[in-house]
């Protein structure tokens, strides 16, 4: 009998942009600088006040012909820059920004990182993210990851049924009222919100597409999508919602016994009922 | 069917193709404090770009507008705006049963104050419409030439010492008593006038805008829609970076001009927006999100970086589109992670891992860690 063990892990700070997730290659802090695996050194700043316009500096590194600086705030990227220089002011001005001159500034939970690339566009090294408004070596993870219920899976993708076989092509066409391209099955490697598993994607020549991810468990809380809410009637627990972002779409996430199911559909007229109907078919077909 | 009825049938068909479609507007404008034009001279541009449809029908609006206004100084509030707005928009539309090609030329007067400034004046419309006659299978062309009066509004979303940004929208522009109307909407940006260096750099930005706009328009107009390979091969990324650089130069010139030390009051917030670039970048990333498989990881990360550089993810005008793109791109990149793993493509994995670290794509980072 397949077993699934759960435990609660408290992730305090996840560091690391380096090859080894366990090492703090946000860089090794050394007083006033942070150095990456290949020697790229972020010279500063390691901290800055909210509202300020800092100048970012880093060391040059052999073989690098391009540097990419990214500054990320609480709501996503604030600013980015690419070039050959080894220092740049936030926003790109060469001198001080006049007091009334608008432009990007450091916000709460702002971090920066710099990456170096060779002539072929390959990555030589990366340093960061360096949090300017908190711990200088911490990586600003989304709040949800600070306390995460994780699953230790003993199932593998090979143990799971092919999601394309759990719901017929005719049913998918009927649910969405369109003739979809045949479902494409693949194994997933633990990306997205699901653990290792299998997926099936149906598309159309228009903007409508839908994908089922079938996995052994969920790795992140189901409230990971901020437009989702708890929904009764599917599996042990389900969250879902419809968004009008872009051309619109929706998501339904279901935990059922040993399985995690995520159904996504993107298109202008997707409804939660359509996702629910797919979920029912999947749940009925699970062993 | 009599000749007259047939003519009305043509009119109705073309009206379906052209008349009822207006630009949905780039985004809902978010006015934080009902900004208006600050006092002084301002010059700016409106960019019209709209495409919709597919293999069987297609509508495209393309054009530019130019505005120049003088704003009087009113104590404690927006000055009275007076000036001109000239624009030229081409409309192309086709379906299985009708086609239309029209040019709209306008030279309007702007007069008003506050966050919504009206503009009005004559529009000259000329072109050729045609409709299919089923009996013969031929398209019968009809020349279109008319002059009409119409109106529009400059709706300001942000205003600062350095720039004024918002949206310009027209009412339906129709022939006198007719039904063949079309309305236009596009983002506008204005910068302080009367300074040679600033105006010269504004012209440079105009030149830099042309190439990426043409690339995107041609791609959107092609029957296959956006083509990733063509976008990359056309050097779109380089052209966009060049455009970002020109806007940075403008920022520098304005910073050096001292203009932002002279303006006071409620106009001291907002930004020198890369409004047009942000709009283009989000349009590109929306297209990428829908067909992420056909774009390379390198290309996706490049466009995402330019979008961040242009402020596309932090401009309030684009909040909804930004949220969509920020959610969809890392979701879609799962495909490239899987593909790179299947192919043992360590360079792509490293590229994705680095981008994930820098942009905060938690799951991609986790799944690309060596």
Image (cartoon, grey):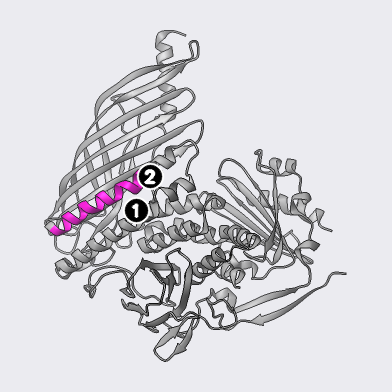
Instruction: Return the x and y of residue B166 as percentages of the image width and height.
Output: 30, 53
Asked if residue A140 shows in the view, the reply is yes
Task: Give the residues drawn in magenta, as a range.
Answer: B197-214
Task: Answer whether labels 2 and 1 touch (C-beta < 8 Å).
Answer: yes
- Tag 1 secondary structure: helix
CA separation in Å, label 2 and label 1:
10 Å
Nearer to the camera, A241 or A4? A4
Q: Residue at x 56, y 44 (%)?
A: A207
Across and down, in percent, residue A189 comes to 67, 64
Q: Residue at x 24, y 40 (%)?
A: B87
Q: Which residue is mark 2?
A: B215
Residue A250 belongs to magenta span: no
Q: Which mark is residue B239?
A: 1
**Image quadrant where residue A190 sits:** bottom right
* Residue B28 makes an appearance in the image: no
The image position of residue A120, as x and y in percent, is 45, 63
Which of the chains bears the disc numbered 1? B
**Residue B165 x/y as whole percent:** 28, 55
Q: Residue furthest bottom?
A: A31
Figure check: A283 above or below B89: below
Of label 2 and label 1, which has the lower sequence position? Answer: 2
Q: Circle 2 sits in a helix, a strand or a loop, which is it?
A: helix
Quadrant where the N terminus of chain A lies? bottom right
């Amino acid at each position: 009998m397949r077993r699934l063990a759960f435990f609660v892990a408290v992730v305090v700070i996840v560091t690391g942009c380096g090859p080894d997730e366990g090492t703090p290659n946000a860089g090794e802090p050394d007083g006033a600088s942070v150095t990456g695996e290949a020697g790229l050194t972020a010279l500063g700043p390691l901290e800055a006040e909210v509202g300020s316009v800092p100048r970012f500096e880093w060391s040059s590194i052999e073989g690098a012909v391009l540097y990419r600086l990214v500054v990320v705030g609480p709501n996503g990227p604030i600013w980015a820059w690419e070039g050959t220089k080894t220092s740049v002011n936030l926003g790109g001005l060469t001198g001080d920004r006049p007091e009334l001159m608008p432009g990007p500034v450091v916000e709460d939970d702002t971090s920066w990182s710099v990456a170096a690339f060779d002539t072929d566009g390959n990555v030589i090294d990366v340093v960061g993210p360096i949090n300017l408004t908190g711990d200088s070596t911490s990586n600003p993870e989304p709040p949800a990851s600070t306390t995460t219920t994780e699953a230790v899976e003993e199932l593998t993708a090979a143990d799971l049924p092919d999601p394309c076989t759990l719901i017929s092509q005719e049913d998918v066409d009927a649910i969405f009222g369109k003739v979809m391209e045949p479902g494409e099955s693949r194994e997933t490697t633990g990306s997205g919100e699901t653990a290792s598993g299998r997926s099936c994607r149906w598309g159309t020549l228009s903007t409508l597409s839908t994908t089922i991810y079938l996995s052994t468990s969920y790795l992140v809380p189901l409230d990971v999508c901020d437009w989702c809410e708890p929904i009764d009637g599917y599996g042990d627990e389900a969250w879902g919602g419809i968004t009008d972002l872009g051309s619109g779409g929706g998501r339904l996430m279901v935990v059922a016994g040993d399985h995690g199911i995520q159904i996504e559909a993107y298109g202008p007229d997707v409804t939660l009922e359509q996702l629910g109907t797919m979920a029912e078919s999947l749940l009925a077909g699970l062993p | 069917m009599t000749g007259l009825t047939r003519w009305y049938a043509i009119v109705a068909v073309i009206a379906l193709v052209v008349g009822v479609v207006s630009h949905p507007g780039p985004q809902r404008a978010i006015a934080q404090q009902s900004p208006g034009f600050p006092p002084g001279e301002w010059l700016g541009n409106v960019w019209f770009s709209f495409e919709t449809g597919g293999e069987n029908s297609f509508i495209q609006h393309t054009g530019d507008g130019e505005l120049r206004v003088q704003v009087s100084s009113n104590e404690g509030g927006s000055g009275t705006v007076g000036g001109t707005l000239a624009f030229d928009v081409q409309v192309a539309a086709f379906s299985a049963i009708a086609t239309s090609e029209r040019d709209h030329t306008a030279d309007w007067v702007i007069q008003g104050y506050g966050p919504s400034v009206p503009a009005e004046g004559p529009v000259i419309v000329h072109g050729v419409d045609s409709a299919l006659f089923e009996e013969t299978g031929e398209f019968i062309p009809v020349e279109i030439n008319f002059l009409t009066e119409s109106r529009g509004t400059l709706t300001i979303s942000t205003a600062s010492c350095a720039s004024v940004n918002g949206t310009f929208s027209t009412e339906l522009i129709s022939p006198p008593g007719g039904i063949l109307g079309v309305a236009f909407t596009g983002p506008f940006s204005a910068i302080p006038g009367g300074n040679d260096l600033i105006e010269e750099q504004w012209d440079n930005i105009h030149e830099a805008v042309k190439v990426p706009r043409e690339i995107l328009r041609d791609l959107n107009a092609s029957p296959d829609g956006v083509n990733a390979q063509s976008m990359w091969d056309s050097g779109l990324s380089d052209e966009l970076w060049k455009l970002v650089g020109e806007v940075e130069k403008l920022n520098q010139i304005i910073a050096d001009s001292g203009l932002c030390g002279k303006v006071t009051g409620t106009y001291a917030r907002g930004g020198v927006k890369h409004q047009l670039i942000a709009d283009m970048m989000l349009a590109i990333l929306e297209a990428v999100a829908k067909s992420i498989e056909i774009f390379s990881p390198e290309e996706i990360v490049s466009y995402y970086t330019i979008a961040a550089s242009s402020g596309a993810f932090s401009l309030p005008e684009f909040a909804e589109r930004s949220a969509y793109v920020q959610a969809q791109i890392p979701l879609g990149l799962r495909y490239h992670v899987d593909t790179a793993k299947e192919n043992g493509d360590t360079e792509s994995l490293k590229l994705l891992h680095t981008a994930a670290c820098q942009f905060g794509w938690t799951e991609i980072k986790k799944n690309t860690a060596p």
